[in-house]
Image (tube, rainbow, N blue to C red):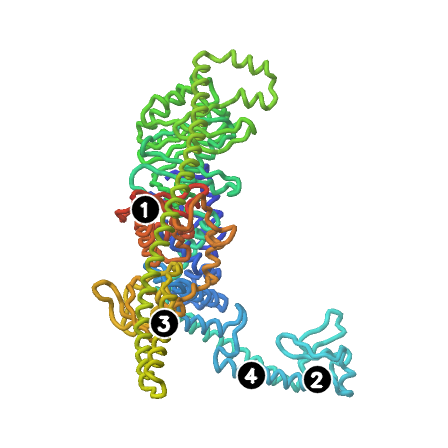
Amino acid sequence: METSYLKTLELDKIIARAAEGCVCKEAKAKLLALEPQCDPDEVRYALEQTDAINTLLIKNGSPRFGGVEGVSALAARAVKGGVLSMGELLMVAGALRNFQNLTNWYGSSEHDMLPTDDLFYALSPEPGLEQQISSAILAPDAMADTASRTLNDLRKKIRATENSIRDRLESMVRNMDTSKYLQESVVSMRNGRYVVPVKSEYRGEVSGIIHDVSSTGATVFVEPQAVVEANARILQYRAQEAQEIERILVAFTAQVAAIEPQFQYSYQAMLDIDVLLAKARLALELKAFKPAVRTDNSFSLIRARHPLIDPQKCVPVDIALGKEYDSLIITGPNTGGKTVTLKTAGLLCAMAQCGFLIPADERSEVCVFDEFLVDIGDEQSIEQSLSTFSGHMKKITGILELAMPHTLVLLDELGAGTDPAEGAALAVAIIEELRRRGVLLMATTHYAELKVFALETKGVVNASCEFDLETLRPTYKLSVGVPGKSNAFLISEKLGIPERVIEAAQQHLSAEDKRLDAVLGQLDDLKLQLKESQHEVEELKNEASHQLEAAQKKRDELIQQGENELEAARAKARALAQQVESQAYALTDELRQLQKDERLSTQQKAQRAREIAKKESEKLFMGTEVVHNPVKEFVPLKEVKVGQEVCIAELNQLATVLSLPDKNGDVLVRAGIIKTKVPLKGLKQPEKLVKDPKPQTKAQQRYSRLTGDANRPNGRVERVHRSAKMECNLLGLTVDEALPEVDSFIDRAILNGQTVVYLIHGNGTGALRTAIHKHLRGNRMVKSFRLGRYGEGESGVTVVELK
């Protein structure tokens, strides 16, 4: 692939921006050398790897990862017999620590098999060796005393000998007889031996070996005879210490050499993971998603944004090519966004082929191009004596040499810089030649002849970048199917060109140009009218939906009220029957006791019996009035077990199951001393067993902040004229939890007669949305579905139309 054209698209800036996120210099160099892949399967796999790491970054945060460099060469040198230094061994330990930290990070959350499994499974941590090196070597020039027992003993001997020397020399310095010979009362070192500074005139008074003389000659540094032997022992110990350190380094080097094959494999996997982490960090920064990769020669970018433009100022555009048409002629005024549209299309396709997620809607699709051929910008050159036109023609000559199928050609201001008639004719001929080569073509122009050519030629379509003539500002919106006007006269007039100059210029237009300008003006007017009509239709549709929803809600409330009253009457009747039975037994017992009472006469007993009967009957009649007690919505039990504690929903009364449901679906329960039959659908879980919703974890809160799905004022999904009964909130649920909720919600909506419902799933990583869309395609009751529009929650909401 010719990479010079990719620089014109500024792919190098994207790669350099991503490379800043690499931890290891070798990974950064690897990423900077990245080129687009030309195999659809490889591109798809690279995108899936980046998307998997992107998801793990959101879930697990960034891994603990330290920068290392050149460790692969160190391991290879260890195999060849070279001895690694302390600093080099610390680098090896750093790489081993990275292997361990990356392995722990990858396994810190549960996930299904991912396309990055092979990379992480290739990591072979050696925690034992890493710990040994880290504890034995403190710095590139410092070995710990505990590196070996021999080293520890030698250093103890050195310190003990040094202390004895200091004691002797300090006693000499403090001695009144000898201190008078000294220049200063200090002990210093020369050539690794302890000495005292003696005045040169008294050099014969202090016996010992002279090791140095001051620059003035007034002081000689003498090693007293009393410490000569001790100093010699220290030198001997130092030599043994160096030998022991060398032995330890050789031993560590041998261990590194022993693991060299798997270490090299792990090291390369670590560099690949570092590259993927850098790509994923860029994706989070750009709010990018994984596009689908097509095998044919067509692409569709939905709400695409140029990644190098400030997201607050960038206007998303929809760009499609290769399905219904293979060439797009973009017209419109200067500074209207034509060039940015070209660069956005080319850059995002090239990014995807490099394994980068792209700043576009996840419904976007890309294809794989063998070449990106680009002519964008002013190609004039003073040094080469090239005019603007000559520079463009030289670039187009190279493009014609390379053009072939599976090539994307982007031409800016095609045919500009020469006579308009000849330039337009040449531009048409170039487009026809490129189309014969089977390329996908996007070109910008101001020539009216190209607009006509696009209108008359099958497979070539006009498009225009809109411009607000009132504010003289571009809207950067791309309208496909409608040619744009350059509006040079109107813009010039707004900017202060005298009116007589504008009128004179209009007189110089040919009749055909005036006719074409009038047609384009009518198209602009029709486009505005169409937009107004679409807006009006949307408002009427929303209003009708709201009214229908309100009517359905009122109907449901009335039906529910009737059902509640009927169930309340039945429950009251059942309770009354039980009460009558209980009171009848009690009344029988009381009458039996009354008959046994011998103190009362027969007449008194009869009178007393009538009073009891009247009193009890009044109590019963007072309890027969049915009181409507609205039942709160609840989740009915699907099955029960004998002895299970349940709650009768209508009465909010705890009860115990005595038998399984009969053929009518009624369950015999005991509430207190009363036994009664209750429909299974009238039983619910006791409130004390209903689990409270779990609070969000810190990871979920961080995820909500990244994706904007939190239930807070700045993060909630916008709703337009719809009630809670039309919505199913799936935020925070996993795919396995969400899909049953979707089925249950759609079933209830169909029973309620609803035709449109809203599934709120948020943006996040897109996994939940993708799973829901796949599930909806297999539901026979779903007529169609789409993502929400502006005001409906956009890509965080799926709008489902039911049959």
Q: Mark 1 points at which residue?
A: 753
Q: Is mark 1 on a helix, strand or loop?
A: loop
- In the displayed structure, does residue 666 sit left or right of residue 329? left
Compared to residue 351, the image places residue 469 above or below, namely above
| Helix, strand or loop under label 3 | helix
Q: Which of marks 1 and 2 is nearer the N terminus?
A: 2
Q: What residue type is labelled 2?
A: Glu
Amino acid type assigned to the residue bearing label 1 in the image? Gly
Which is nearer the N-term, disc 4 or disc 3? 4
Viewer-nearest residue: 382 or 553:
553
Q: Earlier in the sequence, mark 4 or mark 1?
A: 4
User: Which residue corresponds to the image point at 41% horizontal and 41% vertical from the top-left?
Assistant: 547
**Residue drawn at (39%, 47%) of the image:** 554
Look at the numbered disc 4 and give the secondary structure of its residue.
Answer: helix
* Label 1–label 2 contact, CB within 8 A: no
In the displayed structure, 130 sits above or below 632; it is: below
| Residue type of the residue flagged with mark 3 | Lys
Q: What is the quadrant of residue 641 in the picture?
A: bottom left
Report the Cα–Cα distance between label 2 and label 3: 121 Å
Q: What residue is disc 2 on? A: 170
